Image (spheres, rainbow, N blue to C red):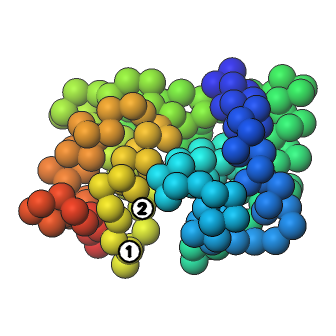
């Protein structure tokens, strides 16, 4: 149900539809999209992040493209009522699989944040959305985390405390730790 709602929400917003229309013509960077559609940097980041989250677009080396196959599959699943099911990676230990199955929705978003002694599998799951050798601003970190849960500050702090993300002391830059 959540995946269906996310898809409908993505396809019903006029700005996101304009982004899809633009990307249907040719791939573009976030900056190009923002300039062509007269969007602020923050708005373009938020809308592209949501479209990427639902699978309508994909990004490689800062260039966004429309994922026609995924978009068609999402539309078909939405119309036929097929539900996504979260399946943890096979290489995880049984305890981590159980924690992720318990705290994640079928679409991979976070239903609840487990207590601190059980949070590590969730943090390992979240950190996969950050690239190595890339510096993120706090706003970008929040946008990535927000795709999964509203508590961006708490989860950002948990990622730093776990040693998975590092940051400048003033919080201006974040990066994934190897």
The residue where tag 2 is placed is 130
Separation of disc 2 and disc 1 at Cα? 8 Å
- Residue 178 showing in the rendered view: yes
Residue name at image x 50 percent, y 41 percent:
147
Q: Is residue 21 above or below residue 36?
A: above
Residue name at image x 51 percent, y 34 percent:
109
Q: Position of residue 125 (x, y in %)?
A: 42, 48
Secondary structure beneath label 1:
loop
Q: Is residue 46 left or right of residue 19?
A: left
Q: Quadrant of residue 132?
A: bottom left
Q: Is residue 15 left or right of residue 111?
A: right
**Number of numbered labels in the structure image:** 2
Q: Is residue 160 above or below residue 25?
A: above
- Residue 53 showing in the rendered view: no
Q: Which residue is nearer to you in this view: 68 or 94?
A: 68
Q: Residues within 10 Å of mark 1 (few under 14, many from 20)?
A: few
Q: Quadrant of the N terminus?
A: top right
Q: Position of residue 53 (x, y in %)?
A: 60, 46
Q: Quadrant of residue 30?
A: bottom right
Query: Residue 2 has which mark?
Result: none
Residue name at image x 43 percent, y 40 percent:
146
The residue where tag 1 is placed is 134
Q: Is residue 175 above or below residue 40?
A: below
Q: Are marks 2 and 1 in contact (CB under 8 Å)?
A: yes
Q: Quadrant of the C terminus?
A: bottom left
Viewer-nearest of discs 2 and 1: 1
Q: Quadrant of residue 110?
A: top left
Q: Is residue 43 left or right of residue 152?
A: right
Q: Which residue is nearer to you in this view: 142 or 14?
A: 14
Secondary structure beneath label 2:
loop
Q: Which residue is nearer to you in this view: 154 or 81?
A: 154
């Amino acid at each position: 149900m959540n995946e269906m709602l996310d898809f409908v929400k993505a396809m019903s917003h006029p700005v996101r539809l304009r982004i899809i229309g633009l990307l249907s013509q040719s791939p573009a960077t976030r900056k190009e999209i923002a300039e062509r559609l007269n969007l602020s940097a923050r708005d373009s980041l938020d809308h592209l992040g949501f479209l990427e989250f639902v699978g309508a677009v994909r990004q490689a080396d800062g260039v966004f493209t429309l994922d026609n196959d995924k978009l068609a599959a999402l539309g078909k699943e939405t119309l036929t009522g097929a539900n996504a099911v979260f399946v943890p990676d096979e290489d995880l230990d049984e305890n981590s699989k159980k924690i992720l199955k318990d705290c994640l929705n079928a679409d991979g978003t976070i239903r609840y944040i487990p207590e601190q002694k059980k949070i590590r599998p969730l943090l390992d799951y979240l950190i996969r959305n950050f690239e190595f050798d890339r510096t993120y601003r706090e706003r970008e970190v929040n946008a990535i985390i927000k795709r999964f849960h509203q508590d961006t500050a708490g989860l950002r702090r948990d990622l730093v405390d776990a040693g998975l993300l590092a940051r400048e002391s003033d919080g201006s830059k974040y990066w994934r730790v190897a």
